[in-house]
Image: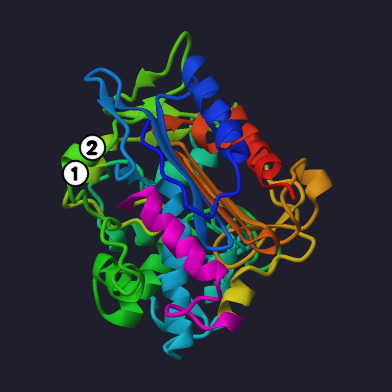
Amino acid sequence: MPTSYSPKTPDSLLRSLVDEVINQALMEKRLVGAVVKVAVEGELIYSNASGFADHETIRPMAENSLFRLASVSKPIVSAAALVLVSQGKMGLDDEISKWLPEFRPHLLNGELAKITVRQLLTHTAGLGYGFLEKEGGGPYHRAGVSDGMDRSGLTLEENMRRLASVPLLYEPGTDWGYSLATDVLGAVISRVTNAPLADAISRLVTHPLGMVDTSFAVLDKHRLVTPYVNDEPLPRRMHDLDIVPVFEGTAGIRFEPARAFDTDAFASGGSGMIGTAGDFLHLLEVLRNGGDPLLPAELVREMGSIQTGDMPLANWPGRGFGLGFTVLHDPDAGQTSESPGTWRLGGAYGHSWFVDPARKLSVVAFTNTAYEGMSGPFTVALTEAIYQGIKK
């Protein structure tokens, strides 16, 4: 397994602990492959590619392997929106109808809703996700709304039209719900910049930071990992169309891995990007260090501050939501060793990441195994191993 460490690494404790967690998950066939990177105080102290990028062809995982990012796209697109805020091209509390006059969903009582940029960033806009609807589908399913993971054949504009035809789940700003808000945010970014979303994200985030492997397209198909789904006795290769519930009783995510190669697929701000663990760690480290050259420090502080007050986050105990990701406020409720103020989110193809500003710690764990790599025991064990390894 190729591994590289900073010469400043004081000892091998973290390496041995994290290696053990990864190797255990591989041995127990909970993961097929993984790339894990850990940075402390700006130094890359752990970087490891393990297992297989493709099990059937025995293609080993590599540190520069490309992954379908799924919701790891969200903080990238959120950062792009904040770049526009920093440039004075839009405000956090501007109504999005300024740029998307046609996107005017109604409340349940029939009144037109008013949605702000901040509400999109914090997932308090009253929107939802089709995959979270009850088994068999609900209003989103009936309206033909795409969650951005399938090959729907829709344009972004048509998907926004369908989404706006469904009444909001609640009045914007009064509740929280994980949602297609980042896809709507992507449509706003496209309008503000007068450019396709892919071009806008390149111009605003990935190009300035040198994230050369991160985009809405597959830059090298030979480096793209094969996706798998947890099963017994071992993970199975994902089908061409695979509907996999995240939670029991829900409709489930419609995975179509070939979407990554579909040049006609709309750019989904919430789930459509491709990239590497190294690129994403670089973005996290830029933000943790104050945002330069991407964002001013005050906007990064706002990004990492809880915007949702006391609203409970379903399936995220002890956390609130900032501008693009969750923020921990109660480690006991979250049953974690992370410090208060830690940022975290994941990705449905099998990814987790977190930033602990208090410990100057950034962690990226990309895998090709859903959902173990996103929310399974591996993510908990990895977090605990890292904190044990950096304990001083």
- 229 up-or-down from 282: above or below: above
Q: Residues within 10 Å of mark 1 (few under 14, many from 20)?
A: few
Q: Position of residue 51 (x, y in %)?
A: 38, 26
Specify few, some or many for label 2: CA neighbours under 10 Å numbering under 14, 14-19, or 20 or more. few
Residue 123 lies in quadrant: bottom right
Q: Nearer the viewer, residue 49 or 327?
A: 49
Note whether residue 103 is visible.
yes
Q: Quadrant of the N terminus?
A: top left
Q: Is residue 115 visible?
A: no
Which one is in front, 105 or 304?
304
Q: Is residue 237 left or right of residue 306?
A: left
Residue 282 image offset from top left, x and y in percent: 43, 61
Mark 1 highlights which residue? 261
Say which element carries label 1. helix
User: Which residue, as the protein is rendered here, is positioned at the far right?
Assistant: 332
Q: Looking at the rendered structure, which numbered label has been put on residue 116?
A: none
Give the left or right position of residue 68, taking residue 374 as reference.
left
Q: Confirm whether the magenta stretch covers residue 296.
A: yes
Q: Is 253 situated above or below 123?
A: above
Picture residue at 39% right of the left edge, 76% below the top: 100
Q: Label 2 amino acid?
A: Ala
Q: Amino acid at mark 1?
A: Phe
Q: Nearer the viewer, residue 210 or 348?
A: 210
Count of marks, rendered view: 2
Q: What's the coloring here? A: rainbow
Question: Residue tagged by mark 2?
Answer: 258
Task: Tell me whether circle 1 and circle 2 mark residues in contact (CB < 8 Å).
Answer: yes
Mark 1 vs mark 2, CA separation in Å: 5 Å
Relative to 251, residue 345 above or below = below
Span of residues in magenta: 273-298
Give the x, y percent position of residue 324: 54, 63
Residue located 59% across and 60% down the image: 126
